[in-house]
Image (cartoon, helix red, strand yellow):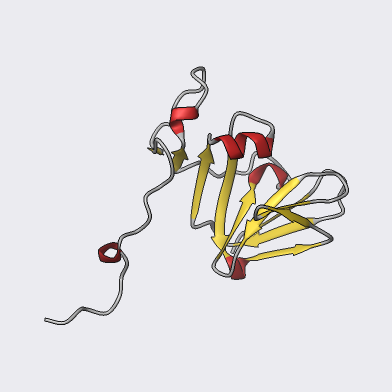
Amino acid sequence: MPKRSGHCLCGQATVSVSGEPLRVGICHCSDCRKESGSAFTFYAVWPRPAFEWTGETATFRGQSFCPSCGSRLFSADAEEAEIKLGILSDPPVGLVPGYELWIKRREPWLRPIEGAEQYDEDRPEPQPQDVPGPPGPT
């Protein structure tokens, strides 16, 4: 099972993930642009049990970062962990986005990623009929 790891700019906070991500994406929304200081954010999502971090972090609006150097690191809840892929060691990371979000805010000089799903805004939430579960009453 592959393991990827990385750290913030000053090295105080580290992250690691095991296995392959559930999904890989790019987001062009205003929040991601402001948070990253760039035209988009490149990230991947892993199941929460596959994610670990060490060191001190601070959190603002669900985004965790190093309080010493300010590097953006991750956001996590009980189910998933979203890792900013730029913090991983040994680039290139070898992961290709499967989708792009908020393409209506994408800079005109950036081209769509070939084969990636394109969403004007957020990805649609799975509908109950899309989620596997026990069969309903007949």
Displayed quadrant of residue 81: bottom right
Of the pair 109 and 37, the residue shown nearer to us = 37
Which quarter shows the C terminus?
A: bottom left
Q: How many marks?
A: 0
- Decide: is 48 above or below 38: below
Looking at the image, the residue that sits furthest to the front is 61
Q: Position of residue 99 (x, y in %)?
A: 44, 41
- Decide: is 32 above or below 126: above
Displayed quadrant of residue 133: bottom left
Which quarter shows the N terminus?
A: bottom right
Q: Residue at x 61, y 59 (%)?
A: 2
Looking at the image, the residue that sits furthest to the bottom is 137
Q: Is residue 110 left or right of residue 86?
A: left
Of the pair 97 and 74, the residue shown nearer to us = 74
Q: Position of residue 119 (x, y in %)?
A: 39, 38
Q: Is residue 41 left or right of residue 14?
A: left
Q: Position of residue 110 (x, y in %)?
A: 51, 22
- Decide: is 26 above or below 137: above
Residue 65 visible, this angle: yes
Q: Position of residue 101 (x, y in %)?
A: 46, 39
Looking at the image, the residue that sits furthest to the left is 138
Q: Residue at x 67, y 53 (%)?
A: 74
Residue 113 visible, this angle: no
Q: Residue at x 79, y 57 (%)?
A: 57
Looking at the image, the residue that sits furthest to the top is 109
